[in-house]
Amino acid sequence: MQQMFDFAKVNPYHPRDFKRSPASGHACATKPMLKAVILQAVATLVAILLGGALFGVRGAISAAGAGLACVLPSWLFAMRLAAMVKRTGTASVTAFVAGEFIKIASIVGLLVLVWAVYPDLHWGGMLIGLILALKANLFAFLVKT
């Protein structure tokens, strides 16, 4: 019988990881969540270089805006869940889903803000930054903790 692929094993934000380590007394889930955010930041740097190479300074700034619009809410989400785990010992599924909704709404709002604040926005650079930052989490399971 073929074994099914378990997305929970590769998802750095999966709720099963949001439990306090009994031996250490601190949140063991902080590492995978921060690893995902760091990978998003690295992907944003790659997007800035790629946007700059393809579209010049406008593309680099656009990629930076889109990447940061993804990285900042993800970092706040990870810190909020880590604080919840530290305080209560675990994070509820409700808190996870609500936090994820707020994160997505924040990303959309920040993207609109980048578009409104930077009039020379290059859509190609912005798409590169957005796609690379959002898809960086797919590679979080490749990096050893």
Image: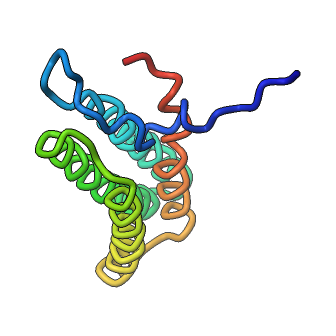
Occupied quadrant, residue 99: bottom left
Instruction: Relative to 61, say whether 71 is above or below.
Output: above
Please state the horizontal and vertical placement of residue 85, each as a whole percent of the image: 21, 42
Q: In the depicted view, which residue is nearer to us: 45 or 105? A: 105
Q: In the depicted view, which residue is nearer to us: 129 or 92? A: 92
> From the image, which quarter does the N terminus lie in?
top right
**Is residue 64 left or right of 80 when viewed as pictured?**
right
Q: Residue at x 46, y 49 (%)?
A: 133
Please state the horizontal and vertical placement of residue 83, each as a whole percent of the image: 15, 46
Residue extending farthest right: 1
Q: Residue at x 23, y 31 (%)?
A: 20
Occupied quadrant, residue 90: top left
Please state the horizontal and vertical placement of residue 58, each as a whole percent of the image: 42, 64
Q: Residue at x 32, y 79 (%)?
A: 113
Instruction: Relative to 110, say whether 38 is above or below.
Output: above
State how the image is colored. rainbow
Please state the horizontal and vertical placement of residue 124, each as a whole percent of the image: 57, 64
**Is residue 28 left or right of 93 when viewed as pictured?**
left
Q: Residue at x 49, y 64 (%)?
A: 126
> Is residue 56 visible in the rendered structure shown here?
yes
